[in-house]
Image (tube, rainbow, N blue to C red):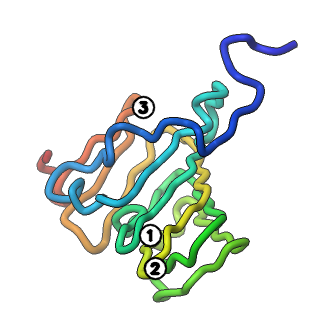
Amino acid sequence: MSDFNYPIAITASEVAPRAKKSIYPEPFASRMEGKEKRILGDLFGVKNFGVNLTRLKPSASSALRHAHTTQDEFIYVLQGCPTLITDEGEQQLVPGMCAGFRAGSGNAHCLVNYTNEEVVYLEIGDRTPGDVVTYPDEDLQAMLVDGKWQFTHKDGQPY
């Protein structure tokens, strides 16, 4: 039996991009220029994990380099050649490559588009409550509280 409140199938590239470019506080939010995220999982009422179709223009980043304590993440490159930056260093990815980040591993990661071509990838992550995100390169940390991200300095002071 289908649920008539949600579509059965859609064309992902036709979903409107998220209006807000970043959930980061300033001065970090403006560093996310050139990223376009289309929230896909929510359209189907998916509650246990999120799926996003993300585009990075040249020089754009997926996020600040970060690691989750309780949420797993997975990416799959569809188009372009982003550079994956992790604690191990940099690795250029090509279409068809994927990467996964186990919750609690502490391996901070992000994608950067150093090329002149657009990058398109799927990002999938779970929604485990109580997640804490660390940003080793920034004076920033985040905690998921009641489904909303709260950002603070590393000393706990709010932004």
Measuring 47% from the left and 48% from the top, which residue is drawn there?
A: 37
Q: Distance between the residues labelled 2 and 3?
A: 27 Å
Q: How far apart are marks 1 and 3 (CA)?
A: 22 Å
Q: What residue type is labelled 1?
A: Cys
Q: Position of residue 44 (x, y in %)?
A: 66, 27
Q: Which amino acid does label 3 sit on?
A: Gly
Measuring 44% from the left and 79% from the top, which residue is drawn there?
A: 116
Measuring 46% from the left and 88% from the top, which residue is drawn there?
A: 89
Q: Is 82 placed above or below 150 here?
A: below
> Which residue is the site of mark 2?
85
Q: What element carries label 2?
A: strand
Q: Is 63 placed above or below 147 here?
A: below
Quarter containing the N terminus: top right
Measuring 45% from the left and 41% from the top, which residue is drawn there?
A: 17
> Which residue is the site of mark 1?
110
Q: How far apart are marks 2 and 1 (CA)?
A: 5 Å
Q: Is mark 3 on a helix, strand or loop?
A: loop
Q: Quadrant of residue 67?
A: bottom left
**Any mark on residue 157, and which?**
none
Q: Where is residue 130 in the image (x, y as percent from the top left)?
A: 44, 41
Q: Is 100 placed above or below 21 here?
A: below
Q: Earlier in the sequence, mark 2 or mark 3?
A: 2
Residues packed near mark 3 inside 10 Å, few (<14), some (14 to 19) or many (20 plus): few
- Foreground tag (1 vs 3): 1
Q: Where is residue 135 in the image (x, y as percent from the top left)?
A: 32, 65
> Which residue is the site of mark 3?
147
**Which residue ends up furthest to the right in the rendered image?**
1
Q: What residue type is labelled 2?
A: Ile
Q: Which of the pair 31/88 is nearer the observer?
A: 31
Dot 2 and dot 1 residues touching (CB under 8 Å): yes
Left or right for 40, reference 1: left
